[in-house]
């Protein structure tokens, strides 16, 4: 098929060349020109129907200024083929071979013209033509639109109708999912949503673990002497526990802030001095002041509670064996009767 658009002739891959003129119907079918040429041209990938293939019929004006030489050579070669096909039809044997030779010569002449005309003819497989750029732009817009809708929540939407929310329980609102996204969610359920749920649970566990280690490595008020803010025996033992049992990345000593800044600084200095004595220089863990409340109970209070519980325990006693009088008499009678019989 040959089309003309402004100064550009568009040849589709195939290539089908047909005359727009109705004079092709008036050709005498008895000369056999049409069928022979159709078969011959079909062997080389072209189908040329007999008829007038003048430049005006194809929609091409060859004498227009600015027409490229390769394109004119191509059209003239095809015009020569059809003209020869119309004129040489007297002798069937000679005309058939002659038309085939002319056809092959025309194809040979047209091949370089087609190769030179790649800049003018927008072949569909070329990246430089307008269709390819339009298709690429359309694909990019489609991909961007689907990416924008990819985060739409699954499930039915809640909508307002006649004063009520349908359904009455919380549901997402807005546009429904794209059909392909609905299929994806149903096919791969519960992925990827279960991954997000698992990640949330993991983050909560990590936060609780972090808070637990901070609490375990904190020195509270009952670890210090009230006046001098020196570490008492319980405080020293807790510092040693941190250095011996806590993981390396958890060996950060936290100190509860005192009622005033002076007391807090004294606590930090005393803890730093204790760590320097226990740990070689260069590997002393950091000491951080922490504003928190005392967790648990003082050791003295716990000791008093336990001692009071022990002192109020009732005295242990053993209950006597449970026996009955009838059972004892019966057993005695049986034993006496046995001795008599002997």
Image: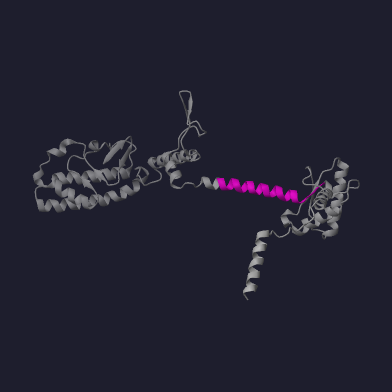
On the image, the x and y values in percent for residue 286 come to 79, 52
Magenta part of the protein: which range?
197-220
Q: Is residue 39 left or right of residue 263?
A: left
On the image, the x and y values in percent for residue 68 come to 33, 41
Specify the farthest residue to the right: 227
Colour setting: one colour
On the image, the x and y values in percent for residue 168 come to 50, 30
**Residue located 66% across and 59% down the image:** 326
Specify the farthest residue to the front: 340
Is residue 203 a member of the stretch shown in magenta? yes
**Residue located 87% across and 52% down the image:** 232
211 in relation to 342, above or below:
above
319 in relation to 222, above or below:
below
Residue 88 makes an appearance in the image: no
**Residue located 11% across and 53% down the image:** 94
Judging depth in this view, the residue of 113 and 191 nearest the camera is: 191
Is residue 215 a member of the stretch shown in magenta? yes
């Amino acid at each position: 098929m040959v089309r003309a658009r402004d100064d550009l002739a568009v040849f589709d891959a195939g290539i089908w060349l047909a005359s727009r003129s109705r004079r092709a119907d008036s050709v005498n079918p008895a000369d056999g020109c049409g069928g022979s040429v159709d078969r011959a041209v079909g062997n080389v990938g072209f189908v040329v129907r007999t008829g007038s293939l003048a430049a005006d019929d194809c929609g091409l004006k060859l004498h227009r200024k600015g027409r490229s030489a390769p394109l004119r050579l191509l059209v003239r070669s095809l015009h020569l083929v059809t003209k020869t096909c119309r004129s040489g039809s007297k002798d069937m044997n000679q005309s058939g071979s002659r038309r085939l030779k002319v056809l092959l010569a025309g194809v040979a002449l047209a091949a370089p013209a087609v190769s030179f005309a790649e800049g003018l003819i927008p072949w569909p497989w070329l990246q430089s033509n307008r269709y390819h750029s339009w298709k690429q732009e359309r694909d990019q817009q489609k991909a961007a639109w689907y990416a924008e809708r990819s985060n739409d929540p699954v499930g039915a939407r809640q909508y307002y109708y006649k004063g009520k929310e349908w359904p009455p329980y919380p549901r997402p609102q807005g546009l429904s999912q794209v059909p392909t996204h609905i299929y994806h969610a149903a096919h791969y359920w519960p992925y990827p949503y279960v991954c997000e749920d698992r990640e949330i649970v993991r983050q909560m566990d990590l936060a609780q673990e972090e808070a637990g280690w901070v609490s375990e490595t904190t020195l509270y008020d009952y670890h210090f002497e009230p006046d001098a803010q020196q570490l008492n025996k319980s405080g020293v033992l807790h510092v040693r526990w941190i250095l011996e049992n806590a993981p390396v990345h958890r060996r950060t000593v936290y100190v509860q802030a005192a009622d005033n800044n002076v007391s807090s600084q004294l606590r930090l200095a005393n803890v730093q001095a204790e760590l320097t004595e226990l740990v070689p220089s260069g590997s002393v863990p950091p000491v951080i002041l922490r504003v928190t409340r005392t967790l648990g109970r003082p050791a003295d209070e716990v000791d008093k509670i336990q001692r009071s519980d022990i002192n109020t325990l009732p005295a242990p006693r053993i209950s006597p064996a449970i026996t009955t009088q009838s059972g004892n008499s019966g057993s005695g009678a049986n034993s006496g009767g046995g001795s008599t019989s002997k």
